[in-house]
Amino acid sequence: MPVPSRTRTTTRRSLVAFGLAGALAVATGPAAPATAAETAAPRPSTATGERVANPVVAGPVARTSPVGDPRHGYPFLATGVDLAAAGYVEEEFFLFGTATRYAVQGTQNATTIATDQPYGTRLVVRRPAAAKKFNGVVIAEWNNVSNQWDQEVDWFQSHEHLIRSGYAWVGVSAQRAGLHSATGLKAWSPSRYGALDVTVGGTVTDDSLSYDIFSQAVKAVRNPTGVDPLGKLPAPQYVIATGHSQSAGRLANYYNGVQPLADVLDGIVLHGGGGVLRTDLATPVFRINSEGDVASGILPAAARAQADSPVLRSWEVAGASHGDWKLITDYGPLRQRDIGSYPGGYPGEPQTCTLPSLSRIPQHMVQNAVYDHTVAWVAQGVAPPSAPPIRTTTTTPPAVARDDLGLALGGIRLAQHQVPLRVNSGSNTGPGFCFLDGSSVPLTDAQLAARYPTVAAYVDASVAATLAAAGAGYLPPSFTRDPAWYSDLRDLITEYVAAGRITEYVAARLEDRLQRAEQAGTAGNAARASELLAQLADRAEQRITRDPAARDAVLRVTETLIALLDTAADRHR
């Protein structure tokens, strides 16, 4: 029988009564007095960039056609986010200058191949429109070119958090493939990007120019001499570089060989890869890797073996994949618009992997915490917490230790992994990028009923796991505002509609409340979001009567979020 609303309310309040309110308070803003380090004035940046040349900046480059127009008179992969509603703007700039070609050599300083090499490339800037919203930090992303075009993976993963927190984001096109491949910028829009060149007229056939180009792009942002890519914002206090996969490897090379020469960055985040790092530099570097990065060897065993230090942190997220659900669902519509095809695993596209692809573990929430920790590290000297590694049974080749469900052991264990509704893994098999996309297989009704005899049993365990992760610092203080809580519930309902277990009429009644709850919750109005979700739960109880398992599936996720929101709302009363 459905759980009466009064019982649900009592259950939610009992979570607070049993101390979860305190756990969330620790996670989202401790009631205890802040430490001296946390209240001290930010330390000034020590990154001078004195030996880095200033490029000539041109722009903002005008948009000569609407976004999506086949004339391509707009920035490639122009965001689909409503930046104006968030008080942000998107602008594109061209950079021209002469750069040094570097040879990188393991953990040694880079050596010079040639100097005064002319180049032209681009920056995409997404920033607060007003100075009062700017938190003083620029996240400079080394765009990924593994698909032979620019892809801003870390923006797709963390843009909601970056916007909410007031970061400015800058995407740098540093490598040849992003500009010169058959699907690169110059081919995509010759009229817009035809003047750009990072190959010195085709004579440079490697990416040896990319390192100094990246340095100069950062220099143009933090110390402009002409056009300021940040517009009327004040000069940034700190610039933190980030890059995913191949870009993480490039940034690892940059950290080892070029940062000691350029000294233009305050910190570096390596996402999904990065090799062995030298240990004699003062610049902090934070490595975040998925279970898939460990299982596939993208994160080399020698790099994994490096212990945390005063300048190195390494986190590994159990159940997460190199390319995941968050990335593909955010990126897919823009790729279809600008390239003409969806990425593998996108909902509704043919599934080619052995298992349903793309882990649903919200690793991006952990990545959001990584950026905030890196800022505190460079600004206050507050070192991030360490995290346990994912357990392996062998290292060469790597084999992840798993439980009886196939869930990875060890690592950062978010509730979606620790209290599973699906078996999420970083591994999969099949053609193309299947080995990178991981997998996600829903538990059966029988498995769910055996693990969670009641909705409350799941809610209690899931909320406790979430708050434990937040209390350990693996989630940011604003984690309840992440839209993934709502999109996960929406995806669940959609799956049950497709299976014929929830009618479209009922789904529409649920979506009405879910959409409004999402608007309130992501805006920080936890009390209103909770109220609307309670109405959604009531509707699920009243209308999903022929399939108790489907009803309970909706209630598990809804009641968990209600409990977290109620606790957050109590903290602000």
Image: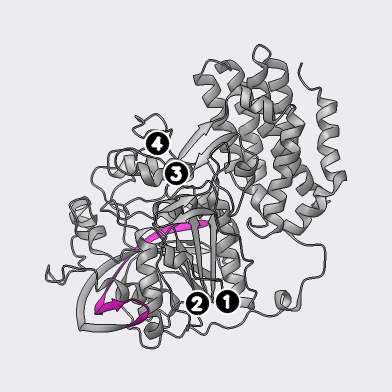
Residue 51: image location, x then y, percent: 36, 88
- Residue 330 is labelled as 3
Q: Which residue is mark 2?
A: 266
Q: Nearer the viewer, residue 72 or 277?
A: 277
Q: What SS does tag 2 mark? A: loop
Q: What SS does tag 3 mark? A: helix
User: Mark 2 Cα within 10 Å, few/some/many (few <14, many 20+)?
Assistant: many
- The magenta segment is 87-109
- Residue 378 is labelled as 1
Residue 517: image location, x then y, percent: 66, 37
Is residue 248 in view?
A: yes
Name the amino acid, label 1. Answer: Val
Name the amino acid, label 4. Answer: Tyr
Distance, label 1 to label 2, CA atoms, is 7 Å
Q: Quadrant of the N terminus?
A: top right
Q: Which residue is mark 4?
A: 346
Q: Is residue 20 magenta?
A: no
Q: Look at 62% across and 48% down and name the residue there.
A: 414
